[in-house]
Image (spheres, grey):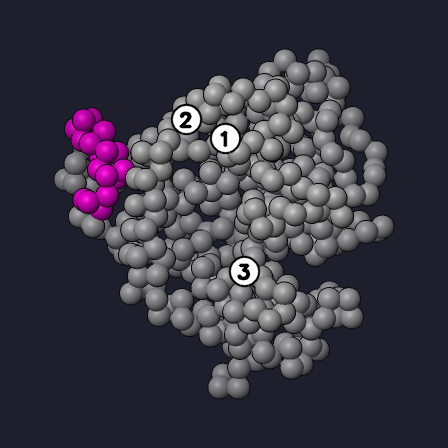
Amino acid sequence: MLRTKLDLRKAEECTLAPYAHFDRDNAGRQYPEKTHPFRTDFQRDRDRILHSHAFRRLEYKTQVFLSGSGDHLRNRLTHTIEVAAIAKTIARALAVNEDLTETIALAHDLGHPPFGHAGERAISKVMKDHGGFDHNLQALRIVDVLEVKYPQYDGINLTRDVRSGLLKHPEHRTELDGRPLSPRPSLEAQIADLADDLTYYGHDVDDGLDSGLLIEDMLKDIPIWQEAAEQAKALGLDSGTGERFPAYTVRCLIDNMVGDAIRYSAHLLEQYDPQSAEEVEFLPQNLISFSPDFLKKTLELKDFLYENLYFGKILDKLNALSLSRIEFLFETFCKDPSLMGETARSRLDKDGVERTAADYIAGMTDNFALMEYLRLHPKN
């Protein structure tokens, strides 16, 4: 049996809710092109992201721990894959477009620089007087400009639906291509955003425990963790059962977050009863959310992670070192642009030296950024 694009679109009509984004109604591309006989436009967008240089580089970019710190610890790529998987689960349960949701999830971290949180703080600092830096805007810049794949234009020519989905903050949702944006992202983009949050809440705890920077006793006063731990204990697991207990507790933690998000979002969808994707984007609130009580618990876990993991004492020295290295690279490339790669140099006249240097550094993997630092620093 042969399934064409038309068949896939008919399947969407049978399975998606009226508030979903249908491929047949997508907002099109900047540069018109022929459609594909066997893939929807959102599926093509997903594949373009998967085949991009920026996506492949995520494997060697820091999530929490510097790339290469441990074979089991997550990097930006594994985090992204996990976000996409969870986002698809939520999208399927709420009958919205899985392909669009997955595509936005896969692209959401493309704009992250090397060295994780410290890297973004460093580039934001040096670009403060030169237009600023935000990894969400950088992800859009990558897919619109910095990826070079086609003879006629820069970027990978994604649909407006995906591109607008990368702009999740209200201050960024003003206009795109000279056309105004709706106040709120699509349901699919809201799902990708929430999936990102709950994924790093759960999996960063997992990595923290795996690395030894966190111990189970440190989590005893975090209600959302204790609820998951009780579920593990109900199956006969405890601290004496080795790695099974924390591993299963993390599993329960993530499942609890996903379940709450699905149930409460379904409640909001029933309450507002939107009859189109466009209507969703002009409602007074996002419809993809944790319940109020559960949200409070997730924020307690988030605060714990920021204090004890992301900017804890042990990682603080590494963060400071990463920040100083990126500041050095930026200053060096701005003083002598010839030290940057050929593709970056080709954008100097159009983008200016500061933005070109920021783009060049933000695209680096941890390893390449360190190699460039060692190559260019006078003390090495």
Distance from label 1 to label 3 (Cα)?
30 Å
Magenta-colored span: 219-236
Place residue 256 in its image quadrant: top left
Residue 234 appears left or right of 320: left
- Amino acid type, residue under disc 2 in the picture: Tyr
Q: Earlier in the sequence, mark 1 or mark 3?
A: 3
Mark 1 surroundings within 10 Å by alpha-carbon count, few (fewer than 14), some (14 through 19), many (20 or more): many
Q: Earlier in the sequence, mark 1 or mark 2?
A: 2
Task: Name the front one of labels 2 and 3.
Answer: 2
- Amino acid type, residue under disc 1 in the picture: Leu
- Amino acid type, residue under disc 3 in the picture: Pro
Task: Name the front one of labels 1 and 3.
Answer: 1
358 vs 264: above or below: below
Distance from label 1 to label 2 (Cα)?
9 Å
At a point 48% along the width and 19% down the height, the residue shown is 270
Q: Which residue is mark 3?
A: 113
Say whether residue 222 is magenta: yes
Is disc 2 placed on a helix, strand or loop? helix
Say whether residue 183 is magenta: no
Asked if residue 244 shows in the view, the reply is: no
Looking at the rendering, in which quadrant would you find the N terminus? Answer: top right
Query: How would you classify the magenta stretch by its main secondary structure?
Result: helix
Q: Residue farthest to the left? A: 240
At a point 60% along the width and 79% down the height, the residue shown is 332
Q: Position of residue 105 (x, y in %)?
A: 55, 40
